[in-house]
């Protein structure tokens, strides 16, 4: 390609500028990962931990809502495949999409606990709540899927849009069960994280690693701060 380009082209090497901006953003992400108001884990720390724990070639299905925006801000993709619905009002997309990815990566007759790629679903509490019964489907067919649920007790994206419109926040609060307890009752391996547990979020990383290493369906419930997205 370089050999076919005309001579005398007036181009600017933008790589130093990109590298400088990337360094600034990495520093900002590190700062945000240390934010702690005592109301749950911040999203920067959560997705930094998930970036460390997940396989480089995993398939990650992301739901709809603030959890998806935060995934886009903070998760550092390597060569993972990311499935999303494009914000088309399809809350609850995460688990069904992960089930489809599991089916694609698990040939008929093979061990359901050993898909060819690691499968992860990233969900908000509102989205998972709409498909909560599918946890029994994961257990019944031994689908090796790790569900990560961000529990902030509200439909956070709708709350944010209402505030942006200078309206009262109306009917966005959720009365959530313990997702970890329900997952365990359905037969999943479960983890529950309610705080950052240190600057590096070591407890969060360990919870993700244990869930991802489990051969079968797993769920990690993370209590998150609705404001630190």
Image: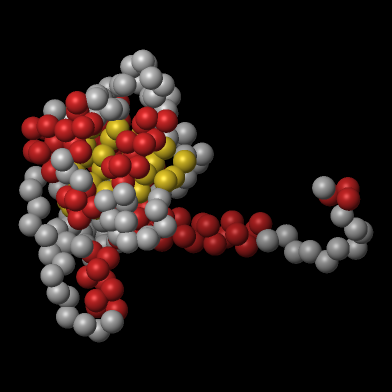
Rendered position, 120 above or below 106? below
Q: Nearer the viewer, residue 139 or 18?
A: 139
Rendered position, 2 above or below 35? above
Question: Going by the image, does 52 lie left or right of 178?
Answer: right
Quadrant for the C terminus, please. bottom left
Rendered position, 17 above or below 58? below
Residue 209 visible to the viewer: no
Question: Going by the image, does 61 lie left or right of 152?
Answer: right
Residue shown at the point (28%, 56%) measured from the top left:
91
Q: Nearer the viewer, residue 149 or 191?
A: 149
Q: Can you name the residue that lies furthest to the front here?
A: 108
Q: Can you name the residue that lies furthest to the bottom here?
A: 166
Q: Can you name the residue that lies furthest to the right here?
A: 7
The image quarter containing residue 86 is bottom left
Rendered position, 84 above or below 89? above
The percent coordinates of residue 104 (x first, y second) are: 42, 30
**Colour pattern of the rendering:** secondary structure
Residue 183 visible to the viewer: yes
The percent coordinates of residue 14 (x first, y second) are: 68, 61
The percent coordinates of residue 164 (x first, y second) are: 29, 79
Residue shown at the point (17%, 61%) measured from the top left:
154
Q: Nearer the viewer, residue 68 or 48?
A: 68
Residue shown at the point (33%, 16%) measured from the top left:
111
Residue shown at the point (39%, 35%) measured from the top left:
101
The image quarter containing residue 98 is top left
């Amino acid at each position: 390609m370089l050999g076919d380009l005309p001579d005398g082209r007036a181009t600017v090497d933008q790589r130093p500028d990109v590298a400088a901006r990337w360094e600034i953003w990495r520093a900002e992400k590190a700062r945000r990962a240390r934010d702690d108001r005592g109301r749950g884990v911040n999203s920067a720390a959560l997705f930094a931990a998930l970036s460390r724990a997940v396989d480089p070639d995993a398939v990650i299905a992301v739901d709809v809502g603030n959890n998806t925006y935060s995934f886009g801000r903070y998760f550092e993709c390597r060569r993972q495949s990311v499935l999303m619905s494009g914000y088309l009002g399809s809350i609850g997309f995460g688990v069904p999409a992960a089930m489809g990815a599991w089916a694609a990566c698990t040939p008929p007759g093979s061990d359901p606990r050993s898909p060819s790629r690691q499968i992860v679903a990233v969900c908000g509490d509102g989205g998972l709540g709409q498909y909560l019964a599918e946890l029994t489907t994961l257990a019944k067919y031994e689908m090796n899927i790790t569900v990560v649920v961000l529990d902030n007790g509200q439909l956070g994206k709708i709350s944010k849009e209402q505030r942006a419109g200078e309206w009262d926040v109306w009917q966005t609060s959720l009365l959530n069960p313990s997702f970890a307890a329900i997952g365990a009752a359905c037969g999943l391996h479960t983890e529950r994280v309610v705080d950052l547990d240190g600057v590096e979020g070591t407890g969060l990383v360990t919870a993700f690693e244990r869930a991802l290493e489990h051969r079968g369906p797993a769920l990690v419930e993370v209590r998150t701060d609705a404001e630190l997205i």
